[in-house]
Image (cartoon, rainbow, N blue to C red):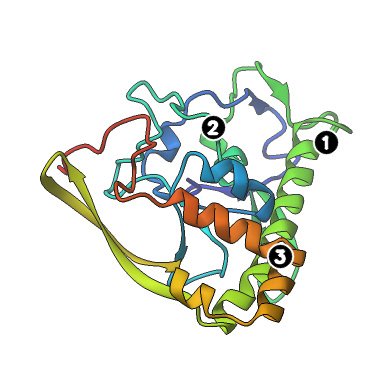
């Protein structure tokens, strides 16, 4: 989504304007989205939620199985589902890490901005307007970043308790196998049930167990049963 993202600059980008995103074609190749804990219940009603075998220890919403095949992006670029993950809603803004620093800088995908004098201005007199789009984007992104960090810590006990197991899901169209989804993990219900009462009680009190149940309820034999578009044949 952010192949051409650049650091936002009040002088270089003074003439750019922002229009609310309604075309989700940029997400057509995005097949998974990391989820903050605050999103998991809503997301589980629509997407299968799994855990990647690499990367951050947060659950992800699966949205497709093959390149260019996000099943929630309609042919005309509109979003065909009910819930849009925060990972996608942040577009065209993103936080970039500064080298040799724990600080982040605000970046933008300039091709998603208007340069014809229309839209909400990013800057006024080289300043960020209070309550303007840049101010709102910064608040949204820093909140999302914080929530992802908190979610990673919340789910760490799953890994320590060794209840995550690797799975390969087969995607079918009728009786025909048209794809597979690999490199993911799910909670093993037998391992979960074998945990001691103290551990399970702690997970209930922390809110982790509610999220685990949302994850398990999101999984169906037909992995993309809730997708607005039926799985399409791979090119």
- Decide which of 167, 138 is in the foreground and name it: 167
Which of 109/26 is in front?
Answer: 26
Residue 204: mark in rendering = 3
Q: Residue at x 43, y 26 (%)?
A: 80
Q: Is residue 135 left or right of residue 141?
A: right
Q: How far apart are marks 3 and 1 (CA)?
A: 49 Å
Q: Name the residue under label 1.
A: 126
Q: Quadrant of the C terminus?
A: top left
| Residue depicted at x 67% and y 19% | 119
**Residue at which label 2 appears:** 112
Secondary structure at numbered mark 1? loop
From the viewer's perspective, is the residue at label 2 or at label 3 nearer? 3
Percent from the top left, x then y, of residue 38? Answer: 69, 49
Residue 94 at x, y = what percent?
Answer: 63, 49
Numbered mark located on residue 149 in the image: none
Q: What element carries label 2?
A: helix
Residue 86 appears in view: no
- Mark 2–mark 3 distance (CA, rounded to whole Å): 43 Å
Q: Do the residues labelled 2 and 3 touch (CB within 8 Å)?
A: no
Could you say which quadrant of the image residue 104 lies in?
bottom right
Quick one: label 3 or label 1, which is nearer the N terminus? 1
Q: Is residue 3 left or right of residue 195?
A: left
Residue at 64% over, 54% down: 36
Q: How many numbered discs, if any?
A: 3
Q: Decide: is 28 above or below 205.
A: above
Residue furthest right in the image: 130
Q: Residue 110 lies in what quarter of the image?
A: top right
């Amino acid at each position: 989504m952010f192949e051409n993202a650049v650091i936002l600059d009040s002088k270089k980008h003074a003439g750019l304007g922002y229009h609310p995103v309604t075309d989700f074609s940029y997400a057509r190749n995005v097949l998974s989205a990391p989820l903050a804990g605050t999103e998991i219940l809503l997301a589980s009603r629509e997407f299968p939620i799994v855990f990647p075998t690499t990367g951050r220890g947060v659950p992800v919403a699966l949205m497709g199985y093959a390149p260019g095949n996000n099943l929630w992006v309609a042919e005309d670029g509109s979003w065909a589902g009910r819930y849009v993950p925060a990972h996608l809603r942040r577009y065209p803004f993103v936080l970039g890490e500064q080298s040799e620093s724990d600080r982040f800088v605000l970046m933008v995908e300039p091709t998603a901005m208007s340069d014809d004098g229309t839209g909400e201005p990013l800057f006024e007199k080289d300043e960020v307007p209070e309550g303007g789009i840049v101010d709102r984007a910064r608040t949204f992104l820093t909140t999302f970043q914080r929530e992802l960090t908190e979610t990673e810590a919340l789910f760490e006990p799953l890994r320590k308790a060794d209840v995550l197991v690797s799975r390969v899901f087969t995607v079918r169209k009728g009786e025909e196998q048209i794809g597979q989804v690999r490199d993911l993990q799910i909670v093993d219900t037998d391992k979960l049930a074998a945990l001691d009462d103290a551990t399970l009680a702690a997970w209930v009190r922390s809110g982790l167990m509610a999220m685990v149940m949302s994850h398990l309820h999101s999984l169906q034999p037909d992995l993309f049963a809730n997708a607005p578009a039926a799985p399409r044949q791979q090119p």
